[in-house]
Amino acid sequence: MASSPLNQSSNHHARSNSLPSRPHPLILQCNEHLCRLGASDTPSSSSTSSLSSKLSCLKDLHECVEKLLQLPLTQQAIVQEELLDGSLRLLDMCSAAKDALIHTKECIRELQSIIRRRPAGDMGLEREARKYLMSRKVVKNAAQKALKGVERKRAVKNHETPAMVTALKEAEAATINVFESLLSYIAGPKVRSKSSNWSLVSKLVINPKRVACENEETDGSEVEKVDAALYSIIGQRRSKSDNTMQIENVHNLLAKLEPIVQDLEEGLECLFRRLIKTRVCLLNIFNN
């Protein structure tokens, strides 16, 4: 027996009700920011321009997360302590990166001041180069400590996890990923072994000008270039040659590095304030 038009309409309406509902606009916004972060995750993603762009994108992402947390539906869905723990982990990593940048900036300015006050070719700069590199080791250790034990967790999408909770977890994972890149950039290369130091010294004795050119043309980060240039000054001192070119090279590299560090520090400061607001929202949800 054929179904009546009324029955056909009722069946169609029943099937429509079973279709998945459209995600909340804020979840779509979070996904857009996550896609922007993913698109910038390239082999050169640790470059300064990329890091600065990612920090700006993270600020927008966590502004969206804060709005998402204010929704009643989100507050009803959040029953997992790991989100609260994750917010604290993000604050700790952001704070560690900020401290490392501040310490690096202070070291840069102190070395710049010393270079300006000293006459060209002054061999006493070797001592200051060693002090800077020792300070850099403190930064490296702090960055490595912050990175140690951090697991990059990817949110698993399934039917049991609410979409809003999944979005929050993905935002946390993306933020950790950016912090890892930033801390790796600040830390620079691993501390050189004595053998590699002596290898560099032997090259300097043979052709110090060539090493200066290599420092300028290397594809390493600005932090790495400054470290390498200072190791060159130490090697130049051992060769008892005039180090005017090396000092000028260090001065130019520091002039490039300082505004980069300043820009990253300001970006982290904005993000840090946003992360604090997110944590306050989470604490309010769990305490109510």
Image: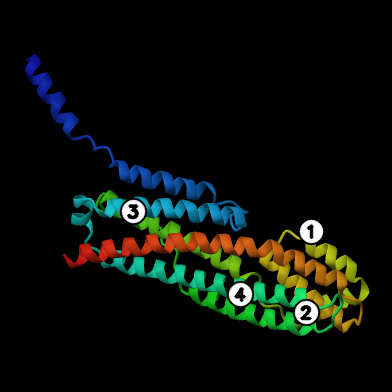
Badge 1 or badge 4: first in the primary sequence:
4
Q: Nearer the viewer, mark 4 or mark 3?
A: 4
Amino acid type, callout 4: Glu
Q: Are marks 1 and 4 in contact (CB under 8 Å)?
A: no
Who's the residue at 47% across and 51% down the image? Answer: 57
Q: CA distance from mark 4 to mark 3?
A: 34 Å
Q: Nearer the viewer, mark 1 or mark 4?
A: 4
Instruction: Give the vertical position of 218 relative to 134 (above or below).
Output: above
> Alpha-carbon neighbours of circle 2 within 10 Å: few (<14), some, or many (≥20)?
some
> Alpha-carbon neighbours of circle 1 within 10 Å: few (<14), some, or many (≥20)?
few
Who's the residue at 42% across and 43% down the image? Answer: 32
Q: CA distance from mark 1 to mark 2?
A: 20 Å
Q: Are marks 1 and 2 in contact (CB under 8 Å)?
A: no
Q: CA distance from mark 3 to mark 1?
A: 42 Å
Badge 2 or badge 3: first in the primary sequence:
3
Badge 3 or badge 1: first in the primary sequence:
3
Residue placed most toward the observer, 53 or 128: 128
Q: Are marks 4 and 3 in contact (CB under 8 Å)?
A: no
Q: Quadrant of residue 275?
A: bottom left
Question: On the rendered structure, is 159 left or right of 91?
Answer: left
Q: Please tell me the numbered disc located at residue 197.
A: 2
**Residue 239, percent across and down?**
90, 81
Q: Quadrant of the C terminus?
A: bottom left
Q: CA distance from mark 2 to mark 4?
A: 25 Å
Provide the residue designation for mark 1: 217
Amino acid type, callout 3: Val
Provide the residue designation for mark 4: 106
**Residue 70, percent across and down?**
24, 53
Who's the residue at 81% across and 84% down the image? Answer: 124
Q: Please tell me the numbered disc located at residue 65.
A: 3
